[in-house]
Amino acid sequence: MDKPTTVDRRKFLGALGVTVGGTGLAGAGLVAGPQLVKAATEPAKGKIPDTPYRTGHMTFFTSPAAVLGEPSHKGHIMAAEEINAEGGLLGKRKIETITADEAAGTDANVKELRRMKLEGKIDLFTGVISSGNSPALAPVAEELGVLTMFTDGCTGFVFDVADPNPKYVFRITNIQSADGITAAIGTAQTWPNVRKIAHIHPDYSYGRNASEHFTLAIERLLPGTQVVSESWPKLGTTDFTAHITKIISSEPDLLYSSVWGGDYVAFYKQALRYGLFDKMKVATTLAMGVAPHAIGKDHPEGVLSGVHSNYYFTYPGGDRWPLNKVFVQRYYKRWNEYPNFQSEGAYVALYMLKTAIERANKLAGGWPEDEAIISQLEGLGMDTPSGYLYIRPDNHQGYKDAVTGFSKNLPDYPFASWDPDRVITIPIRNITAPANWPKPGKGHNESTAAADWIKKTWPKATG
């Protein structure tokens, strides 16, 4: 795809590696990369202090976003409990966690990060949900020299602009541009006759980014589409009536939404009363991103129900991917509920840290300095419940194959979940800009490297 051309849509989707069904495996498109890492089994080398390893976990504990934030905390705590039950990091250092409510707002969150480091003496900062907060927190983490593993806050702006040369800051969730592109691919694969599209997105960076990347991709996958309606509710909106009636009156073939958390729950329940789901197809980036039990049995079937392109607890299936089966079982036993992608991400962050520390200890002995831990996080690849996760060394961004699915009411769960036969998997390398692609302001003025890459390399599709 060196030059934009015109190609057959089906062939183009095939070239992107899109698979539909329950037999794929998230992360399979990356296994040609670094070898999978196995957990250390031999005793730690050298003298290891027994002082606690202190982490600060920031997430939403209040507001409608808590249906994402609380599972993040639970995943973090469960990983810490498991590691501590084995003696702690390197068998000696127990993990202690202090928390902060991300709902306090960006300015307060920046102050809290400073307090956690300077007064709380944290060794690691982790968590963060909102793309409105991570760009402000990343430069502060670098300034403070605190090892940071964002489990969300997925905007490309963090490593493209706010922290373009990261040292201490890493992120393990898929990059935000993947959300809109995944939804566009799912739409083109499933509903190729869509032409009139309505949008509804939260009015801040995440919604704007999701709208932009979906539009860029859909214009190439389904040329001739047009936007017939746009709605931009504020984050935390509880009454979507005016937006719903506006959408219906525009008579779209498809509604595309990046409304998330408790906002999405409120939206879909109000939209049901107006028959919205009977009047149009619906594609989302985050319908199933909330704690699974927050979605009711009343959720309509057949909605393209995104999970931030990351993870849904029923996929990969247990018999094919035991890591996920065991994780879901342990999580359910600990919390009496099923995990979401935030649970899995926060859980994996501590295990990636543990792996990096063990590798650094093997090389030098004793407790490793942050620089040694960072050197082992860079380029680290490992099996996780969601599949294979790889940390790219050039930008400290985590990559795993993108997944989305379709809502269905199954007898196994008291809530709507994913149709096991309609899971869409896309190799992440095929929908993100390559490592050497210029960042915004360095050869182009697009909002993200991915946006520029799509414009310059994706062909127009026909058929």
Image (cartoon, helix red, strand yellow):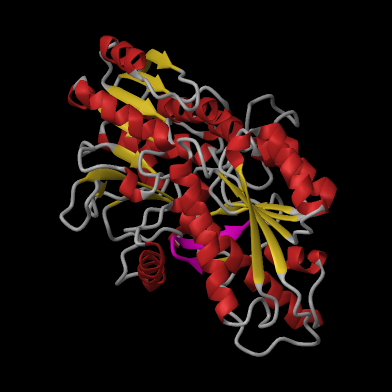
Residues rendered magenta in the picture = 383-391
- On the rendered structure, is 199 left or right of 96? left
Between residue 262 and residue 421, name the one nearer to us.
Answer: 262
Outermost residue, bottom side: 42
240 shown above or below 181: above
281 shown above or below 423: above
Between residue 172 and residue 117, name the one nearer to us.
Answer: 117
- Is residue 404 visible in this depiction of the protein? yes
Residue at (28% x, 25% y) in the render: 270
Q: Which quarter of the figure has residue 411?
A: bottom left
Residue at (72% x, 71% y) in the render: 52
Residue at (27% x, 30% y) in the render: 269
Q: Position of residue 181 (x, y in %)?
A: 45, 36
- On the rendered structure, is 313 left or right of 181? left
Q: Position of residue 304 (x, y in %)?
A: 30, 38
Which quadrant does the C terminus fall into?
top left
Q: Main SS type for the magenta part?
A: strand
